[in-house]
Image (spheres, rainbow, N blue to C red):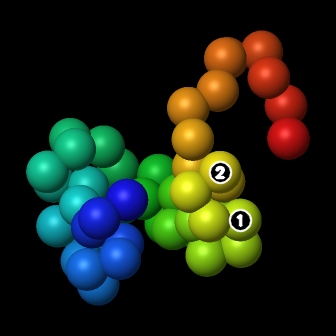
Amino acid sequence: MTGFEAGGKNREIAAALRVSERSVERWRRQWREEGLAGVASQEPWATR
C-alpha cells in the first residue's frame, strides 16, 4: 500500500481507487495493525 506508506490522505486514495473514504479508513486501520497481510485480498468467504 504505497499510498499509506507515502502518507497519502484517505480522500486522495479513495478517489484514485474509486472507493469510499470509509473503505480506505478500514484498510488503513488494518494495515497499521497487521501490515500488508491485513490488507491482502482474500476470498469473499474468508474470515479473519
Farthest residue in the bottom direction?
7
Mark 1, secondary structure of its residue: helix
Whether residue 43 sits left or right of residue 19 in the image: it is: right
Residue 41 image offset from top left, x and y in percent: 56, 32
Instruction: Write down the quadrant of residue 5 in the picture.
Output: bottom left
Residue linked to disc 1: 34
Label 2 crowding class (10 Å Cα cut-off): few <14, some 14-19, many 20+? few
The residue positioned 51% from the left and 68% from the top of the image is 28
Instruction: Write down the quadrant of residue 38 in the picture.
Output: bottom right
Q: Amino acid at mark 1?
A: Glu
Residue 31 image offset from top left, x and y in percent: 58, 65
Whether residue 26 sits left or right of residue 44 in the image: it is: left
Res 23 label: none
Residue 23 image offset from top left, x and y in percent: 47, 52
Res 37 label: 2
Residue 32, placed above or below residue 34:
below
Q: CA distance from mark 1 to mark 2?
A: 6 Å
Residue 19 image offset from top left, x and y in percent: 30, 43
